[in-house]
Structure formats: C-alpha cells, structure tokens
Image (tube, helix red, strand yellow):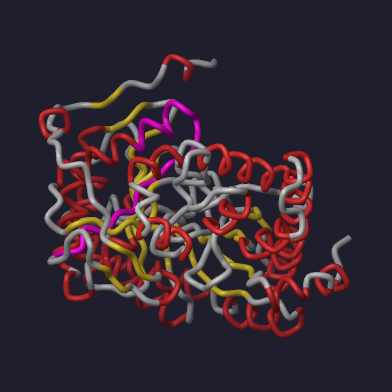
Amino acid sequence: MINIYEVKETNDMIEKANLDVRTITLGISLLDCIDSDLDTLLKNIDEKICRVAKDLVSTGKEIEREFGIPIVNKRISVTPIALVGGSACKSSSDFVKIAKTLDNAAKKMGVNFIGGYSALVSKSMTKADELLIRSIPEALANTEMVCSSVNLGSTKTGIDMDAVRLMGEVIKDTAELTKDSDSLGCAKLVVFCNAPDDNPFMAGAFHGVTEGDAVINVGVSGPGVVKIALEKVRGESFEVLCETIKKTAFKVTRVGQLVAREASKRLGVPFGIIDLSLAPTPAIGDSVADILEEIGLEYAGAPGTTAALALLNDQVKKGGVMASSYVGGLSGAFIPVSEDQGMINAVEAGALTIEKLEAMTCVCSVGLDMIAIPGDTKATTISGMIADEMALGMVNQKTTAVRVIPVVGKGVGETVEFGGLLGHAPIMPVNPFDCSNFINRKGRIPAPIHSFKN
C-alpha cells in the first residue's frame, strides 16, 4: 500500500536533489478514428484527443499540489500516424495536415509535447510509411508540440537499410527547414531499433498497437538523488555501491508508482507502466555523468565508463522493479549530451567522443541522444551512424536510438543553445571517412541467428 507518508520521506530528495516525476504521458489509441476521408479523419483525431485528455493537465497539477511532487511534463502519445493515416493520406502534404491537427490538439490540452508522428518500418516500408517519413521535415517545421519517431529495425526482423538511408536525408532536410532555430526540429525526431510500445519519454513516445484504448505511463527521474546517496558511501566496496543504488532507485520509483496510481484513478484511465530511466536535465546536480564521476571516474568517457554505466543501469532496474506493479518503457539511464551538464563538461574536456558514447549505448537505456554535429555532415554519414546504432540494438536484443542534430551553419568548437530541458551542446566532431557505398546498397540487413527462438 503506497501512501502519503512514503512520499514525505522523499522531501529532501525533492528539495535538495532535483527529484521529480519527469512525465505523465497519456497514451491514446487513434485506431477508431480511421476514415478514408481526410477531413473526417482530422475531425475524429481532434475530437478523440480532446475528449480523452481534457483533464490530464489539471489532474497532474492537482497531484503536484496535494503530494508536493514536481511533475515536470504532461504529455500525450498516439497510435503511429502512418497506420492511422494510411487510408486517407495520398501525399506527404496530407500527413502534414495530421501533424498540424495533433499540434492544435496538444495546444488546446495544454500539454508539453505530443508523440506518435511515427512509422514502424523494421522490415520494410508501406506506401503510407514512406509518405509519412518524407513528410517529417515539413511536419516538424510547421508544428511546435509534435514529436516524431521511426523504428528502423528489430532483433526479430533485422534492419531496413532503405529506411536507414532515407532517414539520413530526412534528418538533413529537417535541420535545413528549422535552421532559423538552430535546427531544433531534429531534437524532436528520433530513430529506434526495438522501440517499445509504452515509452513515456519524448521524442520517442508513441501508443503502440499492443496497448488498449488509453493508458497512463509515468517516467520518473532522480539522477541527483542517486548522486547524493553515493556521496555518503564514497570509497566503499562495489557491494555497498550497488546496494545504495538499488535502495535509492526503489524510493524514487515508489514516488512514480504513487503518481501513476493517482493519475489513473482520477482520470479513469488504466495504469500502464513506470519507466525507471534516470533522465537528466541541464540543472546542476541532475546529471547521469555526475553519478559516473562519483563512482570514480575523472570524467564520463574515461576508461571504465562503460562498466560503470552498466553497473548503474542494472542496479536501477533491480531496485526499481521491486517498487512498481509494472515496469516498462526504456528503464535505465539516459546519456543525452545537451540535456546533461556533466556530459557537456566531459565533451568540452575532450574526455567524451561519439565513438565512446556509442560504446556506452550497449549498456545504457537508449542510445546516441541529443548530440549536436556539424551542419555540413553528409546524409550518408548520418545514416551510417544510425546503422551502427541499429546493429547494436539488433544484436544485443535491446532498444537503441539516435537523435542527432546537424546544426546548419555551425561547426566543431561552436555551441548551440536549445533552451529548457533540451539544454545546450557543443558541436561534436564526426568521423570524416566515407560510408556512402555501404549505405547506398538496397534492401535490409537480416536478423541475427540468435533471433530464431520459436
């Protein structure tokens, strides 16, 4: 039984260590909105979102006031729009009309973001999938709240390399169309391997087809809490270190479980999952990199970083899974660059490179995240980075992702300012050697041998 007294025990965590519930995300199925007439479809989408989500923001604020728990974001995710718009949309511009409808609905509901402008193409693309993917640059350039994601591979199906090649071009086009805001559109676009159906975090949230009509998913976050707890056991053994992380993750997750249950009850929507991910912010003291340094590294990126991150990720899962009825989403530790001041410091010190970040993604919660790269980086190079990350996810049977921002007009040594939770980032150098002959091959990379488990 979770009660208010458990939450009061976390007051110091909230006041001194940046503990918060990062997001309440309301997943909404739009499958019953499908219609062959585009105008009818748009009307159905707007009506469904506004009806189901009308009390989301006010309920989140009520819970914040009553329990004293900061809930940073209230968000909506919807069924991948390539599925919803397949019958009505005959062109990419038709899909953009859906993006604008989603954006308007999100603004009316007062949420921070709406996710699900998405396509699932791990094996191949339908015509609707391709139309949506090609519409992404225009959609993100003409909306404020819409987030987009594309799943390009899975352990069971392999990697759709045609889609990987196309996404390199789409990311470049998105950067160009949003260059007046330092290519900010790319910060709302992520590609996945093994994307989960119940991820509450943006930009990758969508309401998977395995979900019900509506669901509440909650993402908790407490890097600062873990950092302060580890300061008290500095120099102790690995056993003490692991136990401390587990116990702290348990307490953090209990807060998320309470918020999820309360939101579910008050909104009349089933509770889905708690995502245990340690999601940093640009705030000082709210950094995953700081945890790695507290474990014993001079900077994130030093030798031993991947091992330290593996330890952290595993102990967070072990502690958190005992504190919630249902755990899902990504659940681990995010390692974005722009959103984590410690990661930024490591890049500026020369300790952290994209290649080291790639190694860390083998054991982190997701992948190459919020990395600013030179605006003149070739589309095929971006596709190569994506392919590498998809391969890590496919072979290791885990979720991996890429969210890179080729900032138009900027190069290595410069800094880009995104603002808010997206933070700021130094432009990181990219391997200059060419991979276009590899990327321009047609078809897909087959699933690994260990995927055959039937």
Q: Is residue 202 magenta?
A: no
Q: Position of residue 203 (x, y in %)?
A: 41, 59
Whether residue 431 is visible, yes or no, is yes
- Please, is residue 196 above or below residue 73 in the view? above
Looking at the rendered image, the quarter that the N terminus falls into is bottom right
- Please, is residue 178 above or below residue 358 in the view? below
Q: Position of residue 432 (x, y in %)?
A: 15, 42
Which residue is pictured at 58% across the width and 42% down the height? 308
Q: Position of residue 50 (x, y in %)?
A: 48, 75
Q: Position of residue 404 (x, y in %)?
A: 30, 54
- Please, is residue 55 above or below residue 28 in the view? below
- Number of callouts: 0
Which residue is pictured at 43% across the width and 56% down the height? 336
Looking at the rendered image, the quarter that the C terminus falls into is top right
* 184 or 233: nearer the viewer: 233
- Please, is residue 257 above or below residue 208 in the view? below
Determine the image quadrant of residue 121: top left
* 276 or 146: nearer the viewer: 276
Region rendered in magenta: 389-408
Which residue is pictured at 51% across the width and 42% down the height? 305
Which residue is pictured at 24% across the width and 65% down the height? 139
Q: Is residue 300 left or right of residue 168?
A: right
Whether residue 216 is visible, yes or no, is no
